Image: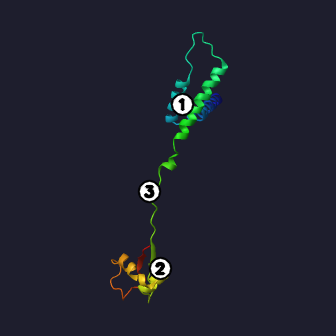
Amino acid sequence: MQKDLKIGMILGLVLVTFTMLWLFAGSGLSPKAKVLNLRSNRETAPPPEKSGSTSSSEIETVRENSYQLSTADNQSQEPEWKQYRQAEKIKTQRFHIIREGETLSEISRTYYDSARKWQKILDANRDVLEDVSKLKPGTKIIIPE
């Protein structure tokens, strides 16, 4: 029993270590970025020499070029949150709940600083207001902009 426990713990540790390395090193780039990175590396790689020797300065040049290409590709793509912009502003509506004894002229004076704009309120609320002279307390009406 002790031997099985030790083997299980070692295998579990190896599996967790492998998974962590894979997550941090292998999947750090999205699949699209990985493809772009592979393409840029192929395009900037020096042609193979027959002797098989490559100087360290050539390797550094290839690394710098591939880094510049991959960062340029990443900068040209807009972040996701910038792609979804709202076409127009959301229109908010003001509401008013009619109190006892209130008239449309008083409501108009409250919101528009003019008692003469009561017709604007009436036009916006034709379906709610049946009789202009008899406003029912508690009725919710729209105050147009």
Q: Check whether the beta carbons of the residues at disc 2 and disc 1 lie within 8 A of each other.
A: no
Q: Which amino acid does the dot numbered 3 rest on?
A: Ala
Name the residue at 33% across, 85% down: 131
Q: Can residue 29 be spotted in the picture?
A: no
Quarter of the figure that contains the N terminus: top right
Mark 2 vs mark 1, foreground winner is 2
Q: Which residue is mark 3?
A: 87
Question: Disc count in the image?
Answer: 3
Q: Which residue is mark 2?
A: 112
Q: Is residue 3 left or right of residue 136?
A: right
Q: Does label 3 or label 2 sit earlier along the sequence?
A: 3
Q: Does label 2 or label 1 sit earlier along the sequence?
A: 1
Separation of marks 1 and 3 at Cα, in angstroms = 34 Å
Image quadrant assignment for residue 46: top right
Image quadrant assignment for residue 53: top right
- Asked if 82 appears above or below 94 in the picture, the reply is above
Name the residue at 56% across, 33% down: 70
Judge by depth and name the residue closer to the eye, 1 or 52: 52
Q: Position of residue 84 (x, y in %)?
A: 47, 51
Separation of marks 3 and 2 at Cα, in angstroms = 29 Å
**Mark 3, other Cα within 10 Å: few <14 / some 14–19 / many ≥20:** few
Q: Check whether the beta carbons of the residues at disc 1 and disc 3 lie within 8 A of each other.
A: no
Helix, strand or loop for disc 3: loop
Q: Which amino acid does the dot numbered 1 rest on?
A: Asn
Q: Which amino acid does the dot numbered 2 rest on?
A: Tyr
Instruction: Spot the residue most to the top.
Output: 51
Separation of marks 2 and 1 at Cα, in angstroms = 61 Å
Judge by depth and name the residue closer to the eye, 1 or 78: 78
Name the residue at 55% across, 17% down: 47
Mark 1 vs mark 3, foreground winner is 3
Q: Position of residue 134 (x, y in %)?
A: 36, 88
Q: Which residue is mark 1?
A: 37
